[in-house]
Image: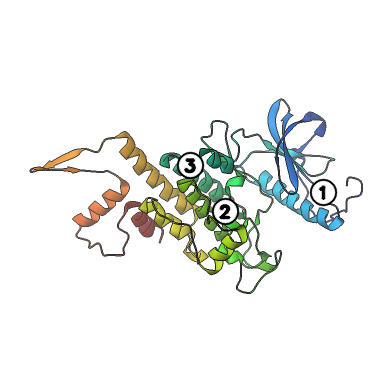
C-alpha cells in the first residue's frame, strides 16, 4: 500500500536514531508467521537479526489499526531496555511496517515445552525461567506499560535455552488511571477474568482494568512451567476464558510445591487488588530458588539430640518457622505454615 497509505497526522514520530537504511538489511528464510505479520531471519551490519514485517491490510481502516499497533510496538521497544526484553535494533525508514530486533535462536517457550513433553522442566530451571519473565514484567510495569499478551508464544529462548526474553509488544500500552482500555485484549486462555463482564462485551469495547491483568497471565505461564501441560485442558479458548471469568475455574495445583501453590493462587486471584506486584513475585521466586539450591548443593547437617537425629534444613522458610516456635508463637490451622508463603504474607501484606 505504499504510495496510497492514509496519512495519520497525529501518529508519534520515530526518533532518527531508530531509523535504519533498508539497503543494509538482508532477508533470509521465514522463521514465523502470524495472522498479520511474518518474521524472517536477516542480517544487518554483519549481525544476525529478526525482521518482522506487518501486513498492511486490504482497507484503509484495517491499515490504520495495524499501523497503530506497529507504532505502539515501536514506541515500547525503543523506550524500555532490559536483559529480559528483546533488544530493539530499529525500523526501516521510507518503508512500511518493519521491526528489526535481535535474533534469538532458541525458539519460543511454547515450542520448547511441547518438545519436552511428557517430561517436565527441572524445578530449578522452571523457576529461573519464571524469574526472567517476572523481571521483564517488573521493568515494563515500572515504566507504566502493560503488556496485555503475556503467553509462551511471546517468550523467546536464547540459543543455549537457558534464558527467556519477552517479545511482541503489539498490544502493549501505557497505563493511565482514568482511561478506558480495549476489552478482551490478548489471548483467551491467558486472559485475566476482569477483561470480561457479566454483561457481554463486544471485542474492542472499552472497560476499566489495570496492570494486574499481566499478573494473572503470568500465573498461567508459571503453572505451565511447573507442569508442562496446557492450561484448561479439554476446553476451547473461549470455554477456558468463560470458565475462568464466570465459574472461577483455575488449573489444578496437584503435585506443585506448596509455597508455589500460594504464589499461583495469589497471582490468579479473582480480585486484581489481591494480586502481588512483580517486584514481590521476583523476591518470592528468588527465596524459593535459594532454598532449592541450598538443599541441592549442601547436604543438611545432622544434629544429634540424645538417641535421635534431626535434619536441620537451613532454608528461609524453615528458619522463619523455627524462629517463631522459639518465640512461642502459635501456628494456627489455616495460617501460612510454610516458608515462602509465610514470607509473602509478612513481607508484602
SS at circle 1 = loop
Q: CA distance from mark 1 to mark 2?
A: 30 Å
Label 3 with label 1: CB-CB less than 8 Å? no
Label 1 sits on residue? 56
Could you tell me residue 263's position as x and y percent? Answer: 43, 55
Quadrant (top left/top right/bottom left/bottom right) for the C terminus: bottom left
Label 3 sits on residue? 118
Q: Earlier in the sequence, mark 3 or mark 1?
A: 1
Residue furthest out toward the front: 234
Crowdedness of circle 3 by 10 Å Cα count: few (<14), some, many (20+)?
few
- Which residue is nearer to you in this view: 24 or 293? 293
Q: Earlier in the sequence, mark 2 or mark 3?
A: 3
Instruction: Between label 3 and label 1, give the one nearer the viewer.
Output: 3
Q: Residue at 31% of width from left, 54% of height from top? A: 338
Instruction: Between label 1 and label 2, give the one nearer the viewer.
Output: 1
Residue 114 can be seen, yes or no: yes
Q: Residue at 27% of width from left, 65% of height from top? A: 333
Crowdedness of circle 1 by 10 Å Cα count: few (<14), some, many (20+)?
many
Residue 84 can be seen, yes or no: no
Label 2 sits on residue? 141
Find residue 235 and report its image quarter.
bottom right
Q: CA distance from mark 2 to mark 3?
A: 34 Å
- Which residue is nearer to you in this view: 69 or 264? 264
Q: CA distance from mark 3 to mark 1?
A: 40 Å
SS at circle 2 = helix
Amino acid at each position: 500500500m505504499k504510495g496510497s497509505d492514509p496519512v495519520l497526522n497525529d501518529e508519534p514520530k520515530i526518533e532518527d536514531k531508530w531509523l535504519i537504511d533498508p539497503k543494509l538489511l538482508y532477508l533470509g528464510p521465514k522463521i514465523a508467521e502470524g495472522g498479520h505479520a511474518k518474521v524472517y531471519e536477516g542480517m544487518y551490519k554483519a549481525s544476525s537479526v529478526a525482521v518482522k514485517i506487518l501486513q498492511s491490510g486490504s482497507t484503509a481502516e484495517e491499515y490504520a489499526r495495524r499501523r497503530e499497533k506497529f507504532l505502539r510496538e515501536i514506541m515500547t521497544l525503543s523506550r524500555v531496555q532490559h536483559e529480559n526484553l528483546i533488544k530493539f535494533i530499529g525500523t526501516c525508514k521510507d518503508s512500511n511496517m518493519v521491526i528489526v530486533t535481535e535474533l534469538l535462536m532458541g525458539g519460543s517457550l511454547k515450542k520448547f515445552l511441547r518438545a519436552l513433553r511428557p517430561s517436565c522442566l527441572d524445578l530449578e530451571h522452571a523457576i529461573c525461567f519464571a524469574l526472567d519473565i517476572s523481571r521483564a514484567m517488573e521493568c515494563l510495569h515500572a515504566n507504566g506499560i502493560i503488556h496485555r499478551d503475556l503467553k509462551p508464544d511471546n517468550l523467546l529462548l536464547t540459543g543455549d535455552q537457558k534464558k527467556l526474553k519477552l517479545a511482541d509488544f503489539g498490544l502493549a500500552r501505557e497505563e493511565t488511571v482514568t482511561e478506558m482500555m480495549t476489552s478482551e485484549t490478548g489471548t483467551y486462555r491467558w486472559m485475566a477474568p476482569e477483561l470480561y463482564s457479566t454483561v457481554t462485551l463486544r471485542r474492542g469495547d472499552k472497560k476499566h482494568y489495570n496492570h494486574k491483568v499481566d499478573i494473572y497471565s503470568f500465573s498461567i505461564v508459571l503453572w505451565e512451567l511447573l507442569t508442562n501441560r496446557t492450561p484448561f485442558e479439554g476446553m476451547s479458548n473461549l470455554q477456558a476464558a468463560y470458565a475462568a471469568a464466570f465459574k472461577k475455574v483455575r488449573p489444578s495445583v496437584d503435585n506443585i510445591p506448596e509455597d508455589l501453590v500460594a504464589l499461583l493462587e495469589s497471582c490468579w486471584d479473582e480480585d486484581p487488588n489481591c494480586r502481588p506486584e512483580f517486584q514481590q513475585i521476583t523476591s518470592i521466586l528468588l527465596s524459593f530458588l535459594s532454598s532449592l539450591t541450598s538443599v541441592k548443593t549442601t547436604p543438611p547437617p545432622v544434629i544429634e539430640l540424645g538417641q535421635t537425629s534431626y535434619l536441620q534444613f537451613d532454608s528461609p522458610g524453615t528458619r522463619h518457622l523455627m524462629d517463631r516456635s522459639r518465640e512461642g508463637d502459635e501456628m494456627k490451622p489455616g495460617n501460612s505454615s510454610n516458608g515462602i508463603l509465610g514470607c509473602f504474607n509478612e513481607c508484602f501484606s
